[in-house]
Amino acid sequence: MQELFDRYDEILTNDAGAVKAEGVKEYTTYAVTNFRGGIGKTTLSFNLAYSMCKKNMTLFLDMCPQQNFTSLFLNSIEPYAGPTIYDALMSKMMGSAWNIENDNFSLRIQDTNDQFKDGKTCYFIPGSSHLFLFPSQFYSRLNEYLGMTSSGNGEKPVSIILKMLKTIIDEQMQETKTEKVLIDTSPFFAGGTHLAWVAADALIIPVRVDEQSIYSLELTLDMLKNPNSDFNIWRERAGITEKPVVQAIMMTHCGWNRQADHQMDRASRMYIERAYDIAEKYQDVFSTPNIINHIALLSDFHSAGRISGSKAIPIDKLHEGKQHRIEGRKLEVNKSVNRYKKELAYAFNLING
């Protein structure tokens, strides 16, 4: 563990972009996932999205029915009235019985959020509150297809249903000419998150430094590894051999010792060590054997995080000393934002290859 904390001393002291985790692999499709809410998942997804846009034309998907990822890209809390990822899924599942006016699901981010105009052309598919209802519809159809015989090309019908999201992604990537994909998922496995795991090459797992998140980390890793988990049972039924690897565990809301520069506080250090111990038990689901190279440490972003979420501004674009009005109150970006930027830069390095 000391290797990890020494690395963060180097990250925070020098240029985070120059600190590389050895052997890190790069993938096309990532899903940000954990079976617990309130851990900073969408904040992390949004800030990774900005970093990805700076390097690659990227497609983003909001698979969470709360639609916070969508709100940040739209820079609006108003409900989105156009076609959503739910419509795309239902169209695949129901065919012509699901009537939508058009199939233009992807929106150009630069048209809705000016903060992304300095990046490459990127797109997002909005989420929908109807994803709360999707699991019952999805599993009913999945069980129905389970009893059908294989199609002409030998693919099992249940495989076609499980790969719906992957098919949508492939189609939209071709249409938008995007190179990478990032999916923000819900904290519930059923339905949308299940499909996201089937579609993803690699998982990014945010873990808050608290007891419930440590427990959910083990649940998440066990779901991926255990042959008797729902995810793997359905993979076997569908004849799907591939599954995602874990690319990163990103510890959120870490606390730093105010009396010693770059030193983690005792409670955060304890949870980080426990997360590492759990990850070692599931080492074979990671993309490389060195677990330390898969862990990023992220602070509690405090006012910078609140400003970022309220104003739909990536933390990388916040400037120390600048004031923003949030819900009638003035909030100032303090100097800690410079540390946050370095932490996020290293987190991006873990998926950037």
Image (tube, rainbow, N blue to C red):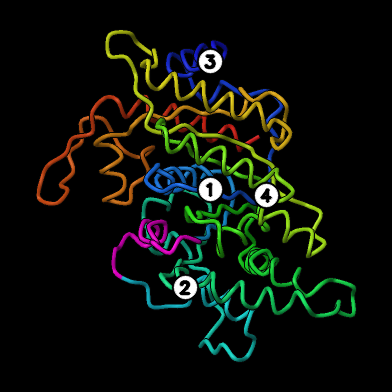
Residue type at mark 1 is Thr
State the residue at coordinates (62%, 40%). Answer: 221
- Given contact means CB atoms under 8 Å apart, are the residues at marks 3 and 2 in contact? no
Q: Earlier in the sequence, mark 1 or mark 2?
A: 1
Query: Which class describes the residues within 10 Å of circle 1: few (<14), some (14-19), or many (20+)?
Result: many
Foreground: 332 or 67? Answer: 67
State the residue at coordinates (45%, 66%). Answer: 127
Q: Earlier in the sequence, mark 4 or mark 1?
A: 4
Task: Specify the quadrant of the image occupied by residue 75.
Answer: bottom left
Could you tell me which secondary element the residue under label 4 belongs to? loop
Could you tell me which secondary element the residue under label 3 belongs to? helix
Per the image, the residue denoted by label 3 is 7
Per the image, the residue denoted by label 2 is 133
User: Is residue 353 placed above or below 104 in the rendered structure?
Assistant: above
Q: Earlier in the sequence, mark 4 or mark 3?
A: 3
Residue type at mark 4 is Thr
Q: In the image, residue 274 lies at what x, y percent?
A: 52, 24
Per the image, the residue denoted by label 1 is 33
Q: Give, as a single range, the part of the protein colored magenta.
A: 63-78
Per the image, the residue denoted by label 4 is 28
Q: Earlier in the sequence, mark 3 or mark 1?
A: 3
Foreground: 318 or 218? Answer: 218
In the picture, the quarter occupied by the N terminus is: top right
- Given contact means CB atoms under 8 Å apart, are the residues at marks 4 and 3 in contact? no
User: Is residue 274 placed above or below 159 in the rendered structure?
Assistant: above
Q: Earlier in the sequence, mark 4 or mark 2?
A: 4
**Front: mark 1 or 2:** 2
